[in-house]
Structure formats: structure tokens, C-alpha cells
Image (cartoon, helix red, strand yellow):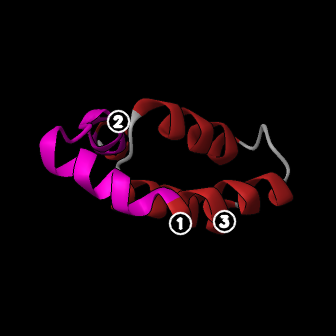
Amino acid sequence: GPCVRQRIRRKLAELVPHEDTVDGLRAVARGDLARKHYRNVTKSLRKATPVLVGLQAREPCCRTRERKTSRQL
């Protein structure tokens, strides 16, 4: 439902990972993947978090935030 999607989007905004993972999570947020796939994605995300934090510090991906603000307007 929409609450799950919001939770995923919030997690996405928190992590702001590199494009591959963002696309994967976007697919989940659109509902293209089953919930068990989302669980797998989050599990792998948790393992990759230290790396992603390093990526985020160097070059944050603003695309997701821009899309979110444009949706609210």
C-alpha cells in the first residue's frame, strides 16, 4: 500500500545511494517487485551502507529529492 511506498521512499532519501541501488529501490517503490524482493534489497543495502555513506559524502544524488519536491507542488 501507500504507507509501504512512503517508507521505501523515506529510506531511499535517507541513503541516497548510487544510481544502481536507487533504480532498484525506485522499482520497488513503483510496485514492480514483490515485498520479499524489497526485503532482499534492504538486506543488501544494510551491508553496503558504509560504502554508500562514503559515496553520499562525495557526490549526493539530488534527483530523488528534486522529484519528491516537484510531486508535492
Q: Earlier in the sequence, mark 3 or mark 1?
A: 3
Give the vertical position of 67 relative to 42 (above or below): above
Q: Main secondary structure of the magenta part?
A: helix
Callouts 3 and 2 close, C-beta under 8 Å: no
Q: Quadrant of residue 70?
A: top left
Residue at image position (28%, 57%) is 53
- Where does label 1 land, which residue? 46
- Range drawn in magenta: 48-69
Exactly how many numbered labels are in the figure? 3
Secondary-structure class at tag 2: helix
Q: Could you classify mark 3 by the number of other residues whose Cα lies within 10 Å: few (under 14), some (14-19), or many (20 or more)? A: few
- Where does label 2 land, which residue? 67
- Where does label 3 land, which residue? 4
Q: Amino acid at mark 2?
A: Arg
Q: Earlier in the sequence, mark 3 or mark 2?
A: 3
- CA gap between label 1 and label 2 equals 24 Å
Spot the residue most to the left. 58
